[in-house]
Image (cartoon, rainbow, N blue to C red):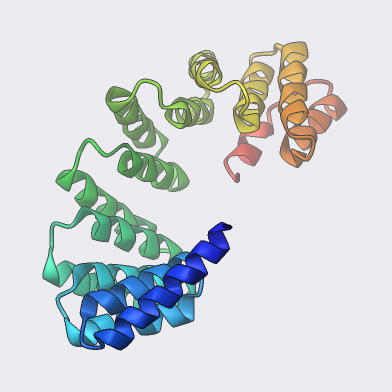
């Protein structure tokens, strides 16, 4: 049975459950969750609102309503839903993370960072929250602070490939290319098949003047994914500029 067929069968069963017990908030919530997982966002929204109508303090329904509204690009309404969830439980980490996400979508980067900080106060061992914080700080140009956030992830899980890669990119931003290369090599040691990491390695090597090695790293990225346009572009630009990479950091920051 395919995943789609399983989802459709589950949706049918949820519809039957709601028919049997129309006053059950949980039945409506479960129906919404299944529709949500099937990317039927408008229908999921109706189901979550039914659940909330029956039981206004159902935290998960408010949170998932916010997620669906966010998917529909209705950001202000999503924020209202998350704020309702916070009224029910002001120390729910998932809600603070969701508020951070929607604030980023609204272009409110500094406010988003405050929300992510709240999430980490609740659970400082959550590597995903530290990663989001680091990415937001780097986007804001606060690279030293982003680096601290990425290093927190390594304290939690020294085998986190993405954290090592992010450390490497942040160190590249700071012109600390030898350290960047060491961090990127750690990421490659954990997962040698990540095209993006090989691209970052090529940039570090290029900045260090190790031009032929940088070309080899870009070639590896392209070997992993022949459609990696960014690796091809950086290598092509370097070739046209006789191996000079002074412009690459401006480009990588836009990625």
Q: Position of residue 139 (x, y in %)?
A: 46, 47
What residue is at 38 percent from the left and 57 percent from the top? 109
190, above or below 2, in the image:
above
Residue 81 visible from this viewpoint: no
Q: Position of residue 208 (x, y in %)?
A: 64, 14
Q: Quadrant of the N terminus?
A: bottom right
Q: Position of residue 32 (x, y in %)?
A: 37, 74
Comparing 196 with 11, the one in front is 11
Comparing 44 with 177, the one in front is 44
**Is 90 displayed left or right of 216 in the figure?**
left
**Is 176 displayed left or right of 195 in the figure?**
left
Quadrant assignment, res 66:
bottom left
What residue is at 31 percent from the left and 52 percent from the top? 113
Quadrant assignment, res 219:
top right
Residue 122 visible from this viewpoint: yes
Q: Residue furthest right?
A: 240
Q: Position of residue 44 (x, y in %)?
A: 41, 77
What residue is at 55 percent from the left and 65 percent from the top? 5
28, above or below 205, in the image:
below
Q: Quadrant of the C terminus?
A: top right
**Is 113 displayed left or right of 251 in the figure?**
left
């Amino acid at each position: 049975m395919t995943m789609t067929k399983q989802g459709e069968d589950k949706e049918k069963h949820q519809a039957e459950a709601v028919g049997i017990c129309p006053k059950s908030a949980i039945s409506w919530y479960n129906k919404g969750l299944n529709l949500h997982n099937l990317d039927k966002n408008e229908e999921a929204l109706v189901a979550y609102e039914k659940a909330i109508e029956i039981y206004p303090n159902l935290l998960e329904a408010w949170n998932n309503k916010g997620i669906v509204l966010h998917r529909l690009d209705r950001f202000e309404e999503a924020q209202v839903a998350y704020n309702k969830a916070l009224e029910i439980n002001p120390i729910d980490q998932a809600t603070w993370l969701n508020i951070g996400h929607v604030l980023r979508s609204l272009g409110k980067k500094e406010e988003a960072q405050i929300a992510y900080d709240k999430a980490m106060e609740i659970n400082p061992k959550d590597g995903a929250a530290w990663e989001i914080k680091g990415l937001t700080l780097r986007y804001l140009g606060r690279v030293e602070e982003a680096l601290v956030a990425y290093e927190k992830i390594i304290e939690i899980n020294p085998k986190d490939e993405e954290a090592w890669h992010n450390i490497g990119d942040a160190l590249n931003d700071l012109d600390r290319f030898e350290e960047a290369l060491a961090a990127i090599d750690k990421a490659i040691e954990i997962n040698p098949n990540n095209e993006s990491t090989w691209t970052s390695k090529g940039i570090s090597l290029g900045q260090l003047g190790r031009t032929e090695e940088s070309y080899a790293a870009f070639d590896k990225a392209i070997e992993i994914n022949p459609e990696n346009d960014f690796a091809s572009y950086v290598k092509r630009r370097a070739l046209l500029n006789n191996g000079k990479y002074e412009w690459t950091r401006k480009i990588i920051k836009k990625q």
